[in-house]
Amino acid sequence: MQRPREQIDAYLLRVLHTLLTEQSVSRAALKLGQSQPAVSNSLRRLREITGDAILVRGKSGMVATERGRELLGFATDALAAIDRITHPATEFAPQTTTRAFRLGAPDYLDAVFLPNIAEVLRRDAPSARLHVQPINAGFDYAGALENGSLDVVIGNWLEPPPQLHMSRLFDDEVVCMLGAQHPLANKGISLKHYLELPHLAPTPYVAERQSFIDGCLAEQGLRRNIQMTMPYFGLVPYVLMRTDLVFTTGRQFAQHYARYLPIRVLPSPFAFPPMRFYQLWHERTHAAPEVTWLRRRVAEVATELDAAGSGAGAGNGAGLATDGTVAGRP
């Protein structure tokens, strides 16, 4: 029965690498701070483990065998991996990184927030890549954060998932959004009108959960008349321009389109609490320098948007975290 070969360890890997780069037992011993007999003994063990001579005598000293040359590449890679495992992560260098950042977000952010994130990444991390994963009711964003498919998820929930890390971004005032041709566009909306009017609502992006708007109404025993749902926020203003529907949303989203399209923004007749926006991430990336950097950049964008919105009467922006993000969906 063949005797099992000895397992190689980190010390033997370093001896192997030094022997093959120095191609001399004496020089390897000097570089490693070991005695020649100790290095010779290690070479003997390595020959038994690999089944190859590794180094043989040549005209002007020791030379590596063909297998030895191959082992040098393996040893170099293995030692580099060991060093990465045993040494703390180096400081993240955004200017040179080629990392792909993966962000989960509903398309509510397309017009208001994501373009600003793209601008910051192109400026501060020009070789990095950004992949945005749309969040909808059929997508397991918590699982994606856990398995590494996503780095950060942005959204607004009445009750954020407790198992994930959370950073609050900002609060946004809830308003009503109408087409300029709507009969009430220049009059205002009473609570009675609000509950009776036909509403446009977004398709829920979290399965089996009420939206922020409907959850708040339900707490007071109220229910709006949802006549139409849309999976894409970019369609909302164009539907409003051609119908008598009303859309309840955050002021920043509504005012963005009101600047360019015949859209009216009216106060909500129901006292909704502010929409609170968060970013979520998993424990696996909590201390990762590159993901920490991303969260901080997103938080900075959120702060800038909130400051701009507050100047126009939008949102109160209380308590921004240093590594949060914006997003959300009514």
Image (spheres, rainbow, N blue to C red):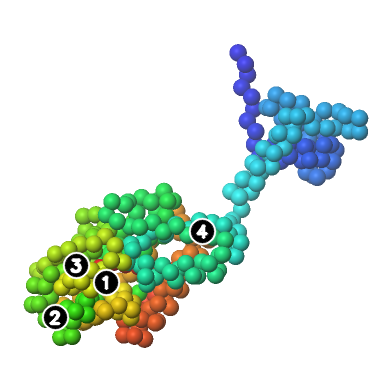
Q: Answer with left or right where residue 281 lies relative to residue 197.
A: right
Q: Answer with left or right where residue 275 lies relative to residue 322.
A: left
**C-alpha span from label 3 to label 2:** 16 Å
In the rendered image, residue 19, in percent from the top left (x then y), is placed at 78, 37
One can see residue 115 in this view: yes
User: Residue at (48%, 64%) from the top-left corner?
Assistant: 294
* Disc 4 element: strand
- The residue wearing badge 3 is 200
In the rendered image, residue 87, in percent from the top left (x then y), is placed at 61, 53
* Residue 249, quarter of picture: bottom left
Labels 4, 2: front one: 2
Q: Tell me which numbered mark, 1 or 2, is placed earlier along the sequence.
A: 2
Amino acid type, callout 3:
Leu
- The residue wearing badge 4 is 129
User: Residue at (15%, 81%) from the top-left corner?
Assistant: 184
- The residue wearing badge 2 is 183
- The residue wearing badge 1 is 237
93 vs 183, nearest the viewer: 183
Amino acid type, callout 1:
Pro
One can see residue 283 in this view: no
